[in-house]
C-alpha cells in the first residue's frame, strides 16, 4: 500500500496539483458547457437516438435516417452512458473523459521514469488534447486506438514482449471502429519506415503472431461492417469510397451527406499542428534544429518523430480537413518533449504559460466572457424556453442541438408549410434564422421569445 508520507509528498508536488486542477477544470466544463453545433451535437443526437430506439447496429442521424459517416464505437459508449445515467451533457461526455484518463496513464507508462509527471502535464495542456478531454466525437477513440497500436508495437519490438502484439492489433481494430481504415494508414507506414531505417529483422515477427493478431483484428472490427451493410445497403460504398477517397481529394465533394465544406489551403495541417501544440511544439522544433542527426539515430526518439510527422505529411495535400486531424499525434508529442525535458531551458515558462492559458480561459468562462460563443452555437437556450405541451418547429432546417435538446420532437417546415400552418392553428413555437426571418412576408403574429445573433425562437398566435 502507498504510505502516507509518499501520498503527502506526491500532493505537495506542484506538477501534481496542476494536473488535478486541469482535470477538475475540464470536468466542470464538461458539466456546464452545452452541446455545440455541428459536430458534438450531431454525435450526441446519434447516441440519444441509439439509446431510445435500441438500434445498436445502424447509427441514425434522425429517426429512420442512417448515419453512414463514421463507425459506431464512440456512439455506443455515449449511448451506454445515457442508458446508465441520463441525457445530460456531463454523462454524454463521461466516456471520453475516462478514455482520456486511460490514455494519460498509458502515455505515462512509456515516459522517462523521472519525467512522468511533466509528461502527463504536457499531454493535458496540449491545446488539442485539452479540447478533447470530453468532446463527443470520434477523434478521441481514434487517437486511443492509434496510440495503443504504436505503443504496443514498440513494446513488442524492443522489450521482447510478445503478448503486446495482440494489443497492437486491438488498437488498430478500435481505430477502425472509430473512423475506419484511416487508422491503418496513420499507423503502418511510419512503423515500416522505422523498421527499414534500423534494418529490423522481420523474422522476429513470427507467422503465428501475425496470423493470431490478424484473427483478433478481424474478429473485433469486421463483423459490424458486414451487419451494417446488410441492415443498410449502400453503407460500405459511401463510407469506404466516399468518406475515405472522395472527401480526401475533393473538399467540395457533392456526395457528402452530413458534413460541410472544409476548404483549406494546401499544407494547412502543419498550421494546425503548430497552433494546437503550443507552446510545447517549440521544444521539439528547437531540438530538431540542434540535434536532428542524433534524434534519427535514437530508436525511441525517431519512432516518436515518425508518429508525429506522418499524420501531417499524409494530410498535407488534402484541403478537406479540420484541426482535430492532428489529435492522434498528441501522446507522441508529450512523450518526445518529456524525453527532452532535462535539457529544456526556461522550464517554468513552459509550465506557467501552458497551464496559465487553461486557467485563464476557465476564469473568463466563469465570468461570462465566452457566453456569446455558446449562445450562438447551440439551441439549448432557445429550447429551454419552449413549453413542452406545444409543438416545436424549425424553418427550413433544424440543428443537431435542437434535435437533442427537444428529444427529437422538433420538426422542419418550409415557408409554404409554415404559412399554411399559421392560418390553421396557433400556439406553436418555431425557430427561425435571422436571414430567413427577413424574407418572410407575414410576421405580425410572430412573438419573439428568445434570440441570439443567429436565430430566434418565436411563438405564433392567431389573432
Image (spheres, rainbow, N blue to C red):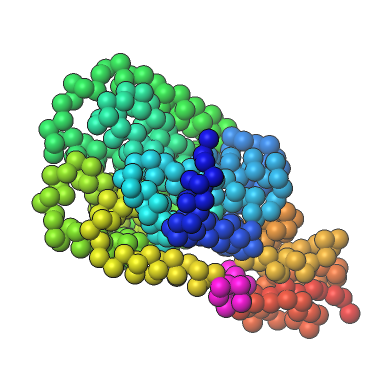
- In the current view of this chain or complex, which residue is farthest to the top? 208
- Report the quarter where the C terminus lies: bottom right
| Residue nearer the viewer, 459 or 26 | 26
| Residue nearer the viewer, 41 or 459 | 41
Q: Where is residue 115 in the image (x, y as percent from the top left)?
A: 34, 50
* Above-or-below relation of 388 to 246: below
In the visual, does 279 lie left or right of 429?
A: left
| Residue nearer the viewer, 409 or 461 | 409
Does residue 283 show up? yes
- Residue at x-position 45% and y-position 70%: 357
Q: Where is residue 223 in the image (x, y as percent from the top left)?
A: 49, 27
| Residue nearer the viewer, 136 or 23 | 23
Magenta region's main secondary structure? helix
Q: In which quarter of the image is residue 253?
A: bottom left
Q: Position of residue 266 (x, y in %)?
A: 27, 63
- In the current view of this chain or complex, which residue is farthest to the right? 463
In the visual, does 154 lie left or right of 122?
A: left
- Residue at x-position 79% and y-position 79%: 447
Q: Position of residue 355 (x, y in %)?
A: 44, 65
Count of marks, rendered view = 0
In the visual, does 30 lie left or right of 282?
A: right
- Residue at x-position 69% and y-position 77%: 451
Confirm whether the magenta stretch covers residue 371: yes
Confirm whether the magenta stretch covers residue 278: no
Part of the protein shown in magenta: 363-377
- Residue at x-position 53% and y-position 35%: 1
* Above-or-below relation of 293 to 346: above
In the visual, does 260 lie left or right of 304?
A: right
Amino acid at each position: 500500500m502507498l504510505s502516507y508520507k509518499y501520498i503527502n509528498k506526491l500532493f505537495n508536488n506542484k506538477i501534481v496539483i496542476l494536473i488535478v486542477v486541469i482535470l477538475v477544470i475540464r470536468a466542470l466544463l464538461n458539466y456546464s458547457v452545452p452541446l455545440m453545433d455541428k459536430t458534438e451535437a450531431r454525435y450526441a443526437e446519434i447516441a440519444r437516438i441509439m439509446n431510445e430506439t435500441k438500434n445498436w447496429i445502424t447509427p441514425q442521424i434522425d429517426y429512420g435516417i442512417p448515419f453512414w459517416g463514421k463507425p459506431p464505437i464512440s456512439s455506443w459508449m455515449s449511448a451506454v452512458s445515457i442508458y446508465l445515467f441520463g441525457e445530460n451533457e456531463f454523462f454524454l461526455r463521461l466516456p471520453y473523459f475516462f478514455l482520456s484518463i486511460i490514455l494519460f496513464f498509458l502515455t505515462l507508462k512509456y515516459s522517462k521514469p523521472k519525467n512522468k509527471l511533466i509528461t502527463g502535464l504536457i499531454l493535458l495542456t496540449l491545446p488539442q488534447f485539452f479540447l478533447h478531454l470530453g468532446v463527443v466525437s470520434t477523434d478521441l477513440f481514434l487517437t486511443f486506438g492509434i496510440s495503443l497500436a504504436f505503443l504496443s508495437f514498440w513494446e513488442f519490438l524492443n522489450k521482447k514482449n510478445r503478448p503486446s502484439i495482440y494489443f497492437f492489433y486491438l488498437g488498430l481494430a478500435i481505430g477502425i471502429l472509430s473512423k475506419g481504415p484511416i487508422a491503418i494508414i496513420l499507423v503502418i507506414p511510419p512503423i515500416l519506415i522505422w523498421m527499414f531505417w534500423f534494418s529490423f529483422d522481420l523474422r522476429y515477427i513470427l507467422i503465428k503472431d501475425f496470423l493470431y493478431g490478424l484473427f483478433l483484428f478481424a474478429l473485433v472490427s469486421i463483423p459490424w461492417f458486414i451487419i451494417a451493410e446488410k441492415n443498410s445497403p449502400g453503407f460500405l460504398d459511401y463510407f469506404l469510397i466516399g468518406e475515405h477517397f472522395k472527401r480526401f481529394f475533393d473538399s467540395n465533394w457533392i456526395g457528402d451527406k452530413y458534413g460541410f465544406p472544409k476548404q483549406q489551403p494546401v499544407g494547412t495541417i502543419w498550421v494546425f499542428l503548430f497552433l494546437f501544440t503550443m507552446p510545447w511544439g517549440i521544444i521539439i522544433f528547437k531540438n530538431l534544429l540542434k540535434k536532428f542527426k542524433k534524434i534519427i539515430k535514437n530508436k525511441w526518439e525517431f519512432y516518436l518523430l515518425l508518429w508525429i510527422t506522418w499524420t501531417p505529411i499524409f494530410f498535407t495535400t488534402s484541403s478537406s480537413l479540420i484541426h482535430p486531424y492532428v489529435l492522434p499525434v498528441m501522446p507522441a508529442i508529450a512523450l518526445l518533449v518529456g524525453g527532452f525535458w532535462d535539457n529544456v531551458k526556461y522550464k517554468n515558462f513552459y509550465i506557467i504559460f501552458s497551464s496559465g492559458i487553461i486557467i485563464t480561459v476557465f476564469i473568463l468562462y466563469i465570468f461570462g466572457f465566452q457566453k456569446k460563443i455558446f449562445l450562438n452555437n447551440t439551441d439549448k437556450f432557445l429550447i429551454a424556453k419552449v413549453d413542452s405541451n406545444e409543438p416545436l418547429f424549425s424553418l427550413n432546417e433544424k440543428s443537431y442541438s435542437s434535435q437533442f435538446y427537444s428529444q427529437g420532437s422538433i420538426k422542419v417546415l418550409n415557408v409554404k408549410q409554415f404559412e399554411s400552418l399559421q392560418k390553421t392553428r396557433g400556439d406553436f413555437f418555431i425557430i427561425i434564422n435571422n436571414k430567413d426571418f427577413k424574407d418572410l412576408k407575414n410576421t405580425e403574429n410572430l412573438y419573439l421569445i428568445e434570440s441570439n445573433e443567429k436565430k430566434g425562437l418565436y411563438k405564433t398566435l392567431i389573432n
